[in-house]
Amino acid sequence: MNNAPEMTKRTAHFDGMCWPRAMEPEDDSVQWRLRYGPQPPSREDVLYAASVMSAYTAIIYKTSLDRAYIVRTLLDAERTNKPKPADRGGV
């Protein structure tokens, strides 16, 4: 364990795992669109929401050491890979 995560717009890949990124732009979040959006959610939004639910289920069954490692890795990656305001590309 200790591979630097490969980050995309919505996922982080490390140590053979893939986790949804929790840090979405506040002005354009799937959470907001699913709750309040005037349009039905896109297929991409639905799949992302499903991946978050799946990740939640997976992480609660991990040991406390594994959970701490995963969360620490994701937080460190978010801190070092913040997208610039114009960087909204990549899935």
Image (cartoon, rainbow, N blue to C red):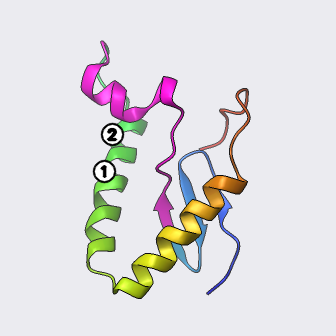
- Spot occupied by residue 34 in the image (x, y as percentages of width and height): 29, 29
Neighbours of disc 2 within 10 Å: few (<14), some (14-19), many (20+): some
Q: Quadrant of the C terminus?
A: top right
The residue singled out by tag 2 in the image is 46
Does 36 appear in magenta? Answer: yes
Question: What is the spatial separation of the Cα atoms under label 1 and label 2, in whole angstroms?
Answer: 6 Å
Magenta segment boundaries in residue numbering: 18-38
Secondary structure at numbered mark 1: helix
Q: Please indicate whether residue 75 sits to the left or right of residue 84 in the image.
A: left
Res 87 → quadrant: top right
Compared with 66, 79 (above or below) is above
> Residue sitting at 61 percent across and 87 percent down?
1
Neighbours of disc 1 within 10 Å: few (<14), some (14-19), many (20+): few
Q: Which mark is residue 50?
A: 1
Mark 1 and mark 2 residues within 8 Å of each other at the beta carbon: yes
Q: Indicate the amino acid at tag 1.
A: Ala
Q: Indicate the amino acid at tag 2.
A: Val
- Spot occupied by residue 84 in the image (x, y as percentages of width and height): 74, 35
Q: Please indicate whether residue 20 sits to the left or right of residue 91 in the image.
A: left
Q: Nearer the viewer, residue 26 or 20?
A: 26
